[in-house]
Amino acid sequence: MIPRPFLKNSRRALLLMALAVSSPGWAAEPGLNVVASFSILADIAREVGGPDVSVTALVGPDGDAHMFEPTPQHARTLQRASVLVSNGLGFEGWMARLKKSAGFKGLESIASEGVKVRTFDASAQAHDSGGKGDRHHHAPRDPHAWQNVANAVIYANNIAKGFAKKDPAHAAAYRARAAAYSERLLALDAQIRRTFAALPPERRVLVTTHDAFGYYAQAYGLRIVPARGFSTQAEPSASDIARLVDQVRAQRIPAMFIENISDPRLVEQLARETGATVGGKLYSDALSPPDGPAATYLLLMQGNTATLASALAAAAQRTP
Ligand SMILES: [Zn+2]
């Protein structure tokens, strides 16, 4: 005969198991189900969420969020999420429609809320008013706010607030992780400032074909030479290229850079025709894959800074 207390206990254990199995999501990924619009936000969300969240990025490593076209699979992913982390500032032009088709009922945390917004300069807008396929110049607000590391502190805090609202039991943990991460961000921010301060001012110049680096340039004292009218989408005409060649020569640009999300051919051609150095690859709007050099946001900003600083320091000073 089985002793009574044992029976009682085993019944309780069975009941607990049944409760656990039937609770939704128990067998799936643990923690708060978070969807981030693109890889950089997903990384910041993982830093803040730690083991209390599971994060999926809609636009993954080396992906171009500007050109993203969501599929029904993406809608299903978003449908299951409790929290959506987006950049805002018009970066995810496809988001409103995706949320609607997913019937998303969760909480949206807009990471850039509260940053000092930079606007694209008016001359570039006028210049491109007739252009087709340009992604950026028609948008008044520059969405690439994460390119200033100090803004990523705001991102982390906004994300922590969103997580805490949806998952109050772990609110203190989210706050603590955001604070610890912010310390690392501010240390990197100071390091980037020191790096460029050590460079002669005339070498602090940046040309790329996608103006993702406005916040970076503003924060760290670089002068941006916009390669106007280009996007990852539009094919530049011969006269566009001739104009850019003149621009690079006239402004004695020492080095140019390709981007992980853009076609490198235009920059390579410009460098060939002007004698500027191709200074390496910059990561603008996406992380590298996990085994690459920009697998996290901190590594991305660190790597871009090292690439820029060493190329700008090494390139021979050119005469027009
Ligand atoms: Zn961009």
Image (cartoon, helix red, strand yellow):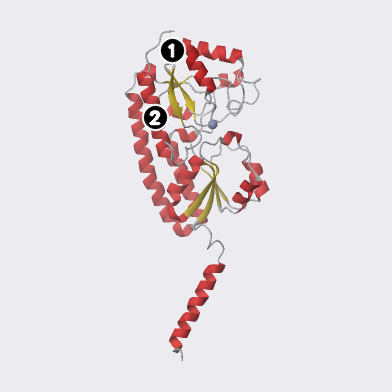
Residue 165 versus residue 121 in the image, above or below = below
Q: Residue at x 53, y 40 (%)?
A: 87
Q: Residue at x 39, y 51 (%)?
A: 176
Residue 257 versus residue 68 in the image, above or below = above
Query: Could you tell me residue 235's position as x and y percent?
Result: 61, 22
Nearer to us in this view, 201 or 256: 256
Other-residue count near label 2 (Cα within 10 Å), few / some / many at <14 / 14–19 / ≥20: many
Find disc 1 in the rendering and name its residue: 252
Query: Could you tell me residue 148's position as x and y percent?
Result: 44, 33
Q: Quadrant of the C terminus?
A: top left
Residue occupying the far right of the picture = 101
Q: Residue at x 41, y 34 (%)?
A: 301
Q: Which of the labelled discs sits on residue 305, or is there none?
A: 2
Residue 300 versus residue 158 in the image, above or below = above
Instruction: Check disc 1 and give the amino acid type.
Output: Arg
Is residue 116 among what the camera can see? no
In the image, the residue with mark 1 has its CB under 8 Å from the nearest atom of ligand 1:
no
The residue tagged with tag 1: helix, strand or loop? loop
Give the quadrant of residue 121: top right
Instruction: Check disc 2 and give the amino acid type.
Output: Thr
